[in-house]
Image: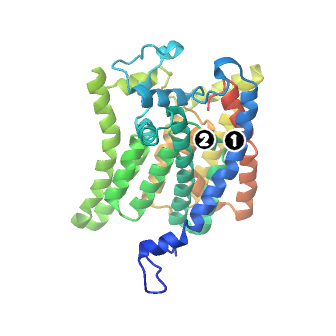
Amino acid sequence: MVTTALDENPTGTGTVAGNARLRGPSPATVYCAGLYVATRLAVALGWVVASLGRTGVQRGDPAVPWDSFWYLTIARTGYSPTLHPVGLGTHDRYSEWAFYPAYPLVVRGFATATRLPLVSAGYVVAGLLGVCAVRAVYALGAEVAGEAVGRASALLFAAWPGSVALSLAYSEGLFVTAAAVALVLAMRRRWWLAGIAGLVATASRPTGLALLGALAVAAGVDIARGGRRSLPALAAPVVAALGIGGFALYGGLRTGDWLVWRHAEALWGQRLDFSTGLVRSWVTRLTHHAGYRSVRALLEIAGMAALLAGLGAAARRWRQLPVPVLVYLVLASATVLGYSRVGTRPRMVLGVVPVFVALAAVLPRRVVEVVAVAFASTIALVTFLYVGDPHVLP
């Protein structure tokens, strides 16, 4: 049983809040913060080595790598009134409308409150949210199968090479935190709070649609079991839908194009092909190319293997998995496997949070530790590739 501040007041005196302050962070929080800091040392090593090899305007500029540019641009200037932005140089052929607003809003608010430069604020926020994400994964694993699985889930998640994204000015930390919290709250039938967390998730990344589906199914099952008494369960999917719905409404009003997000995605060549294009690209890159192209293929293959292993682990215990977790696992996996352009890059696997919980529940503890060490040993290399090579997608 998980003990909380509400359960403990052994002296019978003082306030619960006062006792909580005296105790400080919980052991679970300290454990997760330690995991995050330890794995960030590997990120720092890869970042430094990559930065030493960079020249010109790129040297030391953390806003350059990939999606960080777009998120920080949105935080600085907001969204353009047209699909294509103006004045962004080579970026003009793409569009910031492919990126959801929750993370840029948090960065903008944090920068305003602290008076930090926007780039610095983006990375501080990413770091804080990275710790929160590891802790949220712990909470989800513990809720599903106990504290031991919670610890193992957090370990696998923090050590996964895609966790490099938790140190970039990316939305992964915010999304994983919100999605995992929403799933935990749905399992506890705290529907309004689950909906609020779901709202943040659906306003953070497109994968939030999978969470919305999970909350809708969970609410439907709860209503089917409890009848009218369970109608408050509808609050979860309805409130969660406000995130993505609000962004779609704003996009339509801002640009006059009610499908502006989808059109922005199309600029990156997104199309549903169930990973057939991805597999063909692996064959080409591994047989006809060397260097970064082959490394990128190997990273994607590793992501595919981890995702399929997690699905296999979940299939073994699907009857024990709570409805929202199982539905989210299936839908989120489908979003990753369905689009070759997204593909199974390591950071895309991060959003399929139940994969780490399923693996932690099935694998023996010693195996989890060995797998985590193997994962973590690649973090510095992956960071180096992301930051130092303009052709390796994070």
For residue 250, side relative to residue 17 (left or right):
left
Label placed on residue 130: none
Q: In the figure, is residue 224 to the left or right of 350?
A: left
Residue with the mark numbered 1? 43
**Residue at 42%, 14% in the rendered image:** 86
Residue in the picture at 76% in, 45% down: 377
Local crowd size for mark 1, using a 10 Å CA cut-off: few (<14), some (14–19), many (≥20): many
Question: Which label number is shown at residue 167?
Answer: 2
Specify whether 220 is left or right of 30: left
State which quarter of the image contains the C terminus: top right
| Residue 386 horizontal/vertical position (percent) | 66, 31
Which residue ends up furthest to the front in the rendered image? Answer: 115
Q: Image point 29% across, 30% down: which residue?
A: 250
* Residue type pointed to by label 2: Ser
User: Is residue 170 at least partly visible in the picture?
Assistant: no
SS under mark 2: helix
Where on the picture, by quarter, is residue 280?
top right
Amino acid bearing label 1: Val
Comparing 174 with 289, the one in front is 174
Question: Going 56% across and 61% down the picture, which residue do you hit?
Answer: 317
| Secondary-structure class at tag 1 | helix
Nearest the camera: 68 or 243?
A: 68
Q: Position of residue 376 (x, y in %)?
A: 72, 47
**Image quadrant in which you'd find residue 35:** bottom right
Mark 1 and mark 2 in contact? Answer it, CB < 8 Å. Answer: yes
Asked whether residue 287 appears in the rendered view, the answer is yes
